[in-house]
Structure formats: C-alpha cells, structure tokens
Image (cartoon, coloured by chain):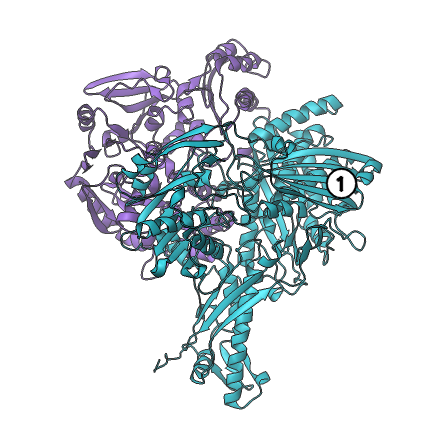
Chain colours: A purple, B cyan
C-alpha cells in the first residue's frame, strides 16, 4: 500500500503498475489535466509538480518532473499541482504575477513554470536573477523567450503574502508524519509486477535477495526513461528514498560521506563548502527538477559514459561502500566501471555510501562543455585533481566523461604531467597523451575531433586559471 | 424566448480595447491549469487510443508486413492499413506525394505504415512494437549538394531577374563568392501533434485537432473517409504552440484518428508522444545557399547572383512557396542594382520539411547578411556601415528583385535610431579595446535589419471570415477563421471588436475556431492572422453596429448619423443613451438580426510567377537588432550578453502581445542559429530525436540585457487600425547573434578575415571557425 496526500485529499493505492508515473496518475486516474505532458523524458518541465515533505514542524517543497516520477515514491508525501494553488477563487501570487507580466503565450508550458515558481516562492522570498534561472532551468518555453517569466518571478521578491498552504502546513505535516509512522514501508502490486519502498537497509538487502531481478530506484531520472521512452516494464522496483540510513551527509576524516539516496539538491551546500568546483558543477547538472531527485549513487550505478559526476569522483579517488545481503565491502572508483553501462556492483548489491576525499590544497578543477548551459548532457566533462610541489606536478588524477565507453581517467596524460611544471609548456606532452588515452566517438552531441580538442584545451584552461597574475575572465559562464 | 435576460452594468470600461496591453485572453486559465488543450478534453465513453507504426529505414520497399502480433496484442481493437482507407490515400496539401500510409515504397525513416487503436495509449504503443516490417533497404539520398547536382527536385526551380547580374559582377572593382549551409529547425511546440475523432451521424466526424488549418483538416478528413466536406466538423480552441508545424502536418494524424474511429465506431484519440513526433513530422527546411557578388571600393553592391536551395525532404508539402519566400527575402533590406536569384527544391530521403515561422524567409536572408559581413571585411569597414550603405533608398534604389517597389521605407531612420539608442559606436570601441587585452574570451557586436514581406504569396489565401453573435443580455460571442496558438490573435481580435462596438472586452467571449461557424478558412500562418481575421471581425462588428444604429435611430426618431457607440453606451443625442445591452434588446424586440458575418480580402497584391514580377506583399514589416556576444576560444562556447531591438509593428494593437512576439521570435531565432542542431545518421535516421539531444534555448540563454522598443509609426497601408503583422518578422532579428559571433571570431584576425560559420553555430562550429580563422590570419600574416 502507498499513501499520500493529493493536495489535502487522502489517496491510498494498492493495485497499480509499479511504473505508473505521477503524470499518468494525475491525467488518467485522478483526471486532473492541468499538468501537461511535453516530452515524457524529464527534459521540458511542462509536467512539473511540487512534492511537499515534512521538514521540522513544517514542510519542504520541491519541484519534480511528474513524467519521470513513479507514483509509489509519493508515499508519505503531499502532491501539489497547478490546480491546487488558487484559494477562494483568487489566483496564487505566482499565478497572478505570470498574468500581470504576460508570462504565458500558448500556455502549455505554463503549469510547469507555475509549479517551479511556486516551489521557489516557498523556498526563497528574495531570489536573485541567478536563483530564478536555476529554479526554472528545467522548464522550456517555446513562445515567450523567458524574459516576462523571469520578470514575473523576480517581481515576487519581498512578497509577504502567505498562501493557504502556509496556513495549513503544520496540519499537513502532522498527517504526513502519521502516514510514515503507521506505514514506514510501502508497496504496490499489479499483475505480478511490484514496487517496494523499504524503510531500512536490512529490508532493502532482504528484498534484493528475494527479488534478484529487481531494479533499484533512487531518483529514477534515468531509469524512468526506459519506461517512458522504450516502454520497458520493470517487474520489480525497489525505491531507496524511504531509507533514512541512506540519506546521510557527513564529514569525517577529510572525507564527505554521502548516502545513496541523497539528492543532488541536498548535497549541494556540503559540496559548495568543501569542494566548490564540484558544487558548481551541480548548477549545470540536469535541471533543478532533476537535481531534486537524482543522486550520486544513481549516476554511478547506471554507469552512463556521459554522467557528470563520475569524472569528478574518479579525479577525487572516491570509494563506494557496497552492501549485498549482510556483506559489506568498499570498492575504489577506479575498479567500479567495467564496461559500457556495466559496473562491479555485485548481484543483489547496493551502494550505501559514497566516500569523497576532500583534497587539501590541490589544484582541483571541474569543467563541463555542452551545447546549452542549462540542462544539457556534456559533450565533454573533465575533472582535474593535481598535486603540485613548487610548481611541479607530483600527482595527478584526470577524470573525463564523454570521451570513452565509460567515465575514465586519462592515465597517459596523468603520467605525462608528473614531474613537469604545470604551465603551458609543461602540459604539452599531457595534451598529446590524451589522444592515446581516448578514442571518442562522433555522436549527436559532438564529433570525436571536437571532444579531443576541447579536452586538450581544458588542460590549458586549468593552467591559465592557476596563473593568479591574470584576472581576465576565462569562462563565458563567469562573464558578467 | 419569452423573457429577456436582466440588463446590468450600464457603463463599462473600454480602456482595454485596441492599443491597450491587455493580458492574453486565456492567461488566467493558462496559469491555473484550466485551459483545455485537445488532450485535456474529457473523452467520450469508450474512447480508444491510437499509435502509429513506421518504417525505420529511410529508403526502400516493404517486402512483407506482418501485423499479426499487433492485432493480437493486449487491448487492441482496430488496426488500419493502406487498404482500409475508403477515400483518397495521399494527403499532400498542395501537390501529391504524402501517402497517409505506405504499403510499399518507403521514402524516409518515420514514414507511417499502419496505425492501431487500443484501450489505452500504452497498449497501443506496445502493440505497434510487435509489427514485423521486412524491408529492402537502399542507400538514402541525404546530401543536399548531391541532390542539387543530380537535379533531384520535388518541384521545378524558379528564377528572378532584374538587370544583368553577370555583367555587373564581372565589371565590378571587387568580387566575392561564398556558400553556406543553414540548418533546419525542429518546431518543438510544447504540445505535440494530437487529434480526437468522434463519430457522428451519417458517417460524419467531429474532429478536435491541434491545427493551424482547421479547414484543410476538414477537407482531408472528408477525402480520406470518402464523404462530403459538410459532414466533417473541425474544432480548435487553442494549440500549445504551432510555429508552422501544425499548418499542414497536423492533418495526417487527424485523418488516421478519423479512419480508426470509422473502423471501430468509437472515438479515437491520436496523440504523438514526443519520441514519435520528432522523427515523424517535418521541420524548417535546411538550406544550401551561394552568392557571387560584385561591389565597389566603398562596399556598395553592384550586382549579385544568389542561389538558395531548400532541402525539402521526400515530398513537396509547402516547399514551392517556402523556397519562393526564401528567394523573396534573399535581398533582405538591400538594394541590388543587377540581380539574379535562383531557387531550387531538392528531394532527400528525410521527412518532408514544412512551414516554420518565417517560411523560408530566414534561410534566404542568411545569404545576403553573410555577404554584408564579408564585404565589410574585404573593404575594411564596420559591417554596419556596409549595411547602411546598401539599404533600399529613394527612387532608383527602391526596386526589389521581383519588381515590387519598396514604399514607406523606414529602415534607414529605424537603424539610425537603434544605432544611437544601443550606443553601437561606443560599444564597438569598447569591445575592440577589450578584445586586445583578453586572450581567451572575445566579444563580438552586430546590428542587422529585417524587412519582411507581409501577405501569403499564394494570393487566394489572403481572405478571412468572422461570425459575431450579440445576445440579449449584451454579451457577445465572437468567432473567426484564425487559430490561437499562443500568439495572442484572439486577444487582438477581441480588442478590435470591443473597440469597434465600444464595449468592454470582458463582454466578449471568443469561441473555438470551428469549420461550421466560419467555413473555407486559410491557415493561421504568414503572420497574417490579425491582418485578415481582425479586419473580417471588424467588418462583422461594423455590420451589427449599423443595424443597431438604424434600429435605435428609428425608435428614437433621429438620423442614423446621430447614433454614437461610446463606453458601452449607445447615444442618440448628446445626453441621451441606453446601454449596449438595452440597445441589443431593443434590436431583438424589433426583429433585427443580431448575428453577422464579416469578410475581408487583402487589396493590391499580385504576383506573376511566369515573369517573376509583381507585388506579392501588401507591405513590409521592419526591425533591427543589436546583439553582443562573448565567445570562448578554448571550447567555442558563447553567451549572448546584450540585445537591443527596435521593431516596427505599425500602430500596436496590443504592445504587450507585440513585445511577446518580438522577444519570443528573437529567442526562437537565436536557438535556430546557435544550439538547435538537427542530425541524421548515415542511414537517414534522425538522431536528434528528443529534447535530451535537441537543445532549444533555456531560461539562462535569455540575455541579461534584453531591450525591446516599438518603432512609433502607423502602417501607411490600410490595415486594421494601421497595425502591422508581428508573428514572423522578429524571428530574423536573431541573425544579429550569428553575425556577432562571426564578429567575435573575426577579431582573432584583426577583422581581416570573414570567417565561414554555417548554422547552427554550435560551440563545435564556433571552435572550428576559431581554428580556421587563426590559420587564415597566419597565412595573411595578420597576427
């Protein structure tokens, strides 16, 4: 059984497909059609809804793409859609602002924008333009050119109006907590296909033993695409998001320990504090909706060659804490990726934590190159972790994405850096060595030649940035 | 009726009428999820859901088609093949070439072969996957240059000539030639193609379709069903974006839904999921353009030979008119004394490319704007000076290559105004200094103009109708032949009618566009929606106003000329009036019809294609934009930093709507020229097939400085309230972004090299141009 609140209405689901999306639930079962399907792949944001969860005495509100969110993940949460913002026949302040600023034209993307803006309104009453852009990075509009939408969002700065949700927050929070207290675990079953929401790692381990064919579901932002795009029908899904043990973020012995169910959004502030270059990568990883759900563990376990965080974790020499059954082990990131979308994760195993070393005063750089700044997949992603002693490289780990069938280190280039000064002359051999490390492919995102040239140039960028004498801007993203 | 509705609201506001920045008529519904799109309509009981099966080869023949697995798939109720179609089977909008379903020849990857209706959408899509289509595949023709060399055309070529271009080029002091590839564009309307077909009596059909052209959907549905047109009704309340992509290409899905509905006797909804919509529907035509030009030492054009070649895909669709419009705009805003323009329509094995905002105009403009920059580099002057030097001017410099005189030419003044307001010259100096100091990042600046011809170039499409009912409570229902796709057409037409009748727009309900209310309509396209339908609606309102005036005059024993409509009141003397509703009741009680149609056709226009001469356009809409960019010479990435636009909408009917069209058009154009890259693999399969790999502009691509001003000048032609069309023209303002990127790259060679930069100018292409420009500069010894 799965229980959640649709606005303030209790919903209990028992028999429904484990891969029923929140969008399809809304449009076909609840017959609430304000939420639109634009792409069914989490790329356009037209289907954005807000999920509220207890946080202290109140609620925290996050925007998610309902097309790639499975309905079972709503257990113990409140689902809010564009239909739930009006009160007493009056538009919500974010809705009124969109009307006043002419922020809708065809209107099809509008409900999604409204929900992203509503989540922002709940989170930040003094948003900067940058924060507005981050909040709306996963919402595509083909009509307006965004200017009126940005202005509408900015106009809400300083708004003091509390909406009806604020007034009801404590009561809703209490109801949600009661659902979780009464039913810490959840499940769905339909035609022999199952969805499980375990509450503990022990339960999870046992479920994986019982259902060896099960697929682990963390954020689901990648897994859901196999359902919506390839029409695959997973037999068993086990959702990690209900397990408190997997949601830790700790700092210990110069390492960050990150639980497998921690979303990028939750991770962001810790990363920005300890590993700012990594933290800033998150600003461009997917969209806010994707970051609100996606996890480091998911990015590692799906082993996509174009995941953005594996190159960084490779450069930082992260370690993965793996559990299968009652057996725990630690696998170094170097040994984790074994082939195209293949990993060393044992059968019935799951990632519990990711241990990320925080280097002391190494040169640590992370670069992402893609066609579009917001919500795009990298043509090349690079992370450099370089130890220097009096200007000479003594150790180097260079992680790359988009260059090979797996996220990979540039081992030859690393060797070519060591013992040489980290300057324009000193990196020449390493730049050439990249061509021995990688034979990238031509694909829809970039050609092989471009990828190699960019990889070379990113090493040069790291050198130029390290040169503290220069204050010239070196990245267009940083250009004001 | 026996009792009439009570009359309230004696005095109304009319401040939101024509000229006011009134909110979109559906804005409150958009933001609260209450605006219904076709997919949101509550389906009739028993509705089935359809999916379309297609071949995944780009060229060849079907050897065997085995649908047994489809028929036996869970939930399947009906399967449709070519032989099941009772009427015509080719839905080509102008010329044949678009089989609704194919049983034999395959001409592009994504070509529909069969359709299935099932209990749920998922069941329909899963059933489709169980088809076994065995094909004999041939190497597809994908290269437009190869198609051009082999003269593989979907339609005959067309030429425009004035003077002796060859002689002028040969005798010119300076000459240049160049070629360019201009990429196509996926519409990416947020709402995909969708139709709901509901069976009606007598074999008829009610169709809800997300279409820009309800009348054509009506005609084609009737034809595939083999029934008269009068048995089909098409209803279209609003689209979630169209941009041209639903002008012809909404029809096949409506036809398939109707055929499945006929076959199963149940309502059928066919909604293309995005992963089908992208490979199965046509895009903006990619173009391959060439010029050869002669000019003097100052950079003034003396002669030009221009060739524009559209990559049309497998069939004509609208390509005749689209390549014509590319030709009509390959001069953009510039006078070419002796000129020869040729346009070709190449066949390739891709989906048939179609209308998209600008309709070939943008692709044509690209070649002359490339020439302007190239001339500037050749003679060592600022590109803006070259553009100004070559603008259309007064007598002797005012004739287009198609022999239409450029009247009311306001671009010289508009450009001067924008040059000052954008501080073009000061910024040019700042940028040159900045570039000298910065090694990795380089900034670029460009001002480019737009002169865009308004009217359908197919003359008979320039007509429209409207239908207005006034009810006895004074409320008004308004209907016209145009469709609402977000452009604010309904809002403007509402304002026009409110202004005409001097009532509040809130009294007017605009209803879904329906073929049974206004028949034989033109597509809502060519920026013409307001010009045509606004005027037709105004004519209908004037008819009703006249009838009410005559009635009131008779009742009050005054002359008709004494009747005035003001602020929701009808006055028969200086201080005696009744409310509009009272006047409506008076008319009703005196048996005066309160329903009227209105009709409009555009005057003055004609074009003789034989001689390539005429006046295809009623008038021109103009504008100019200044864009500033910064590029990264290590990766080719870039940002658009600042945009200043001055645009000519005549006398604005709604400045907020117009600004929305200008901003939205600009950003869409920017996407076309920068990050939106269509790619087909060697087998002819579209691999940029999802928003994960086809990147339209996102929120942070909007420049932080984005200033839009309206050029204050009434249209000197008699358009509705002297306004001008605004849908398409601003799209081409984005050419300034592309030109600014070239400017930034040219800075690497001290502006002595004019870098080739095909579009879309992705970071990869920009980096390639950076490398090539440095190489050329080294060869010239520039740096």
Compared with B84, A185 (above or below) is above
Residue in the picture at 40% in, 79% down: B7
Compared with B530, A278 (above or below) is above
Write down the chain letter for disc 1: B
Q: Measured from the top left, where is residue B515 in percent x and y?
A: 45, 61
Residue bearing the label numbered 1: B304
- Direction from residue B441 to residue A44 in the image, left or right: left
Res A261 quadrant in image: top left
Q: Measured from the top left, where is residue B663 in percent x and y?
A: 55, 49
Neighbours of disc 1 within 10 Å: few (<14), some (14-19), many (20+): many
Residue in the picture at 26% in, 46% down: A78
Q: Nearer the viewer, residue A443 or A459?
A: A443
Q: Measured from the top left, where is residue A399 in percent x and y?
A: 44, 19
Q: Nearer the viewer, residue A229 or A355?
A: A229
Q: Nearer the viewer, residue B234 or A245?
A: B234
- Direction from residue B88 to residue B362 in the image, left or right: right
Q: Measured from the top left, where is residue B357 in percent x and y?
A: 56, 48
Res A465 quadrant in image: top right
Q: Quarter of the image for the C terminus of chain A: give it.
A: top right
Q: Is residue A196 visible?
A: yes
Residue lying farthest bottom? B557
């Amino acid at each position: 059984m799965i229980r959640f609140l649709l606005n303030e209405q209790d919903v209990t689901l028992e028999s429904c497909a484990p891969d029923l999306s929140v969008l399809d639930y809304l449009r076909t079962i609840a017959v609430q059609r304000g939420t639109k399907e634009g792409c069914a792949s989490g790329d356009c944001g037209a289907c954005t809804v807000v999920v509220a969860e207890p946080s202290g005495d109140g609620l925290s509100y996050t925007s998610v793409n309902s097309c790639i969110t499975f309905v079972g993940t709503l257990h113990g949460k409140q689902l809010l859609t564009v239909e739930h913002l009006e009160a007493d026949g009056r538009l919500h302040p974010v809705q009124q602002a969109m009307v006043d600023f002419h922020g809708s034209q065809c209107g099809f993307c509008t409900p999604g924008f409204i929900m992203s803006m509503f989540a922002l309104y709940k989170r930040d009453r003094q948003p900067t333009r940058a924060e507005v852009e981050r909040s709306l990075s996963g919402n595509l509009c083909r009509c307006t050119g965004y200017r009126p939408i940005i202005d509408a969002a900015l106009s809400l700065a300083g708004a003091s109006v509390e909406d009806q949700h604020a007034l009801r927050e404590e009561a809703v929070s209490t109801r949600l907590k009661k659902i979780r207290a009464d039913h810490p675990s959840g499940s769905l079953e339909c035609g022999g296909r199952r969805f499980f929401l375990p509450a503990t790692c022990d339960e999870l381990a046992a479920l994986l033993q019982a259902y060896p064919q099960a697929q682990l579901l963390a954020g689901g932002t990648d897994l859901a695409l196999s359902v919506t795009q390839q029409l695959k029908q997973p037999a068993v899904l086990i959702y990690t998001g209900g397990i408190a043990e997997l949601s830790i973020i700790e700092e210990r012995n110069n390492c960050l320990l990150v639980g497998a169910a921690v979303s990028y959004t939750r991770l962001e502030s810790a990363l920005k504090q300890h590993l700012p270059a990594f933290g800033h990568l998150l600003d461009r990883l997917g969209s806010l909706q994707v970051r609100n759900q996606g996890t480091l563990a998911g990015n590692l376990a799906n082993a996509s060659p174009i995941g953005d965080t594996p190159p960084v974790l490779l450069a930082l020499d992260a370690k993965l804490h793996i559990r299968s059954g009652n057996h725990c082990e630690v696998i170094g990131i170097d040994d984790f990726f074994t082939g195209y979308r293949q990993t060393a994760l044992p059968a019935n195993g799951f990632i519990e934590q990711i241990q990320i070393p925080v280097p002391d005063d190494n040169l640590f750089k992370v670069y992402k190159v893609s066609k579009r700044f917001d919500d795009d997949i990298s043509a090349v992603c690079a992370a450099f972790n370089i130890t220097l002693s009096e200007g000479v490289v003594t150790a180097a780990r260079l992680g790359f994405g988009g260059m090979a069938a797996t996220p990979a280190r540039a081992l030859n280039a690393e060797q070519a850096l060591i013992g040489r000064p980290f300057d324009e002359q000193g990196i020449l051999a390493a730049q050439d060595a990249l061509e021995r490390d990688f034979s990238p492919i031509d694909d829809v995102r970039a050609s092989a030649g471009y990828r190699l040239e960019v990889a070379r140039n990113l090493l040069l960028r790291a050198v130029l940035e390290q040169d503290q004498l220069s204050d010239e801007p070196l990245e267009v993203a940083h250009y004001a | 009726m026996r009792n009439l509705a009570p009359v309230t609201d004696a005095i109304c506001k009319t401040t939101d009428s024509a000229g006011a920045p009134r909110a979109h008529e559906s804005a409150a519904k958009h933001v609260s999820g209450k605006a219904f799109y076709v997919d949101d309509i509550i389906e009739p009981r028993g509705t089935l859901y359809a999916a379309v099966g297609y071949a995944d080869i780009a060229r060849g023949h079907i050897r065997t088609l085995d649908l047994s697995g489809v028929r036996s798939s869970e939930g399947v109720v009906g399967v449709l093949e070519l032989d099941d179609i009772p009427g015509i089977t080719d839905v080509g909008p102008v010329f044949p070439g678009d089989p609704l379903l194919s049983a034999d020849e395959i001409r592009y990857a994504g070509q529909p072969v069969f359709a299935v209706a099932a209990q749920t959408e998922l069941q329909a899509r899963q059933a489709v996957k169980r088809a076994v289509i065995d094909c004999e595949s041939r190497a597809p023709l994908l290269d437009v240059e190869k198609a051009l060399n082999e003269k593989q055309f979907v339609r005959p070529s067309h030429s425009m000539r004035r003077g002796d271009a060859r002689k002028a080029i040969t005798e010119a002091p300076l000459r240049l030639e160049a070629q360019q590839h201009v990429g196509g564009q996926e519409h990416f309307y947020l709402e995909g193609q969708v139709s709901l077909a509901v069976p009606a009596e007598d074999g008829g059909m009610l169709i809800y379709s997300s279409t820009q052209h309800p009348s054509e959907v009506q005609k084609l549905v009737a034809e595939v069903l083999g029934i008269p047109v009068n048995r089909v009704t098409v209803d279209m309340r609003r689209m979630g974006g169209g941009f041209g992509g639903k002008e012809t290409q909404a029809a096949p899905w409506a036809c398939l839904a109707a055929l499945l509905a006929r076959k199963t006797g149940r309502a059928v909804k066919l909604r293309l999921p995005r992963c089908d919509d992208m490979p199965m529907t046509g895009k903006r035509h990619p173009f391959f353009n060439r010029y050869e030009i002669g000019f003097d030492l100052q950079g003034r054009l003396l002669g030009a030979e221009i060739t524009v070649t559209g990559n049309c895909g497998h069939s004509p669709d609208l390509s005749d008119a689209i390549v014509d419009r590319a030709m009509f705009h390959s001069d953009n805003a510039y006078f070419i004394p002796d000129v020869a323009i040729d346009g070709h329509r190449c066949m390739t094995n891709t989906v048939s490319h179609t209308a998209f905002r600008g309709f070939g105009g943008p692709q044509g403009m690209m070649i002359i704007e490339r020439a302007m920059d190239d001339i500037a580099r050749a003679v060592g002057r600022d590109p803006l000076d070259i553009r100004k030097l070559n603008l259309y001017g007064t007598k002797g410099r005012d004739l287009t290559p198609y022999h239409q005189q450029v009247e009311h030419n306001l671009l010289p003044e508009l450009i001067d105004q924008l040059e000052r307001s954008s501080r073009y010259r000061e910024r040019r100096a700042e940028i040159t200094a900045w570039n000298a100091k910065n090694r990795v990042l380089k900034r670029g600046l460009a001002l480019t103009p737009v002169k865009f011809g308004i009217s359908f170039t197919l003359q008979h499409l320039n007509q429209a109708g409207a239908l207005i009912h006034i009810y006895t409570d004074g409320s008004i229902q308004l209907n016209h032949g145009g469709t609402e796709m977000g452009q604010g057409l309904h809002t403007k037409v509402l304002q026009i009618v409110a202004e005409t009748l001097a009532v509040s727009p809130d009294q007017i309900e605009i209803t879904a566009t329906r073929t049974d209310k206004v028949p034989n309509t033109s597509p809502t396209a060519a920026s013409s929606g307001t010009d045509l339908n606004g005027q037709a609606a105004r004519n209908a309102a004037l008819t009703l106003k006249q009838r009410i005036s005559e009635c009131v005059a008779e009742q009050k024993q005054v002359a008709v000329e004494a009747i005035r409509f003001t602020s929701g009141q009808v006055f028969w003397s200086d201080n005696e009036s009744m409310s509009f509703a009272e006047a409506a009741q008076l008319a009703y009680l005196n048996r005066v019809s309160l329903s009227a149609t209105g009709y409009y056709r555009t005057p003055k226009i004609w074009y003789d294609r034989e001689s390539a001469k005429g006046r295809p356009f009623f008038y021109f809409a103009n504008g100019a934009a200044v864009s500033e960019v910064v590029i990264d010479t290590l990766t080719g990435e870039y940002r658009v930093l600042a945009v200043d636009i001055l645009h000519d909408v005549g006398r604005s009917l709604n400045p907020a709507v117009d600004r929305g069209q200008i901003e939205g058009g600009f950003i869409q154009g920017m996407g076309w020229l920068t990050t939106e890259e269509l790619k087909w693999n060697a087998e002819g399969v579209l691999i940029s097939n999802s928003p994960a790999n086809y990147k339209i502009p996102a929120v942070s691509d909007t420049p932080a400085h984005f200033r839009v001003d309206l050029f204050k000048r009434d249209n000197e032609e008699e358009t509705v309230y002297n306004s001008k069309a605004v849908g398409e023209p601003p799209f081409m303002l984005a050419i300034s972004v592309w030109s600014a990127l070239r400017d930034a790259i040219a800075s690497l060679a001290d502006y002595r090299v004019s870098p080739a930069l095909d579009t879309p100018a992705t970071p990869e292409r920009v980096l390639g141009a950076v490398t090539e420009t440095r190489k050329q500069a080294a060869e010239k010894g520039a740096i």
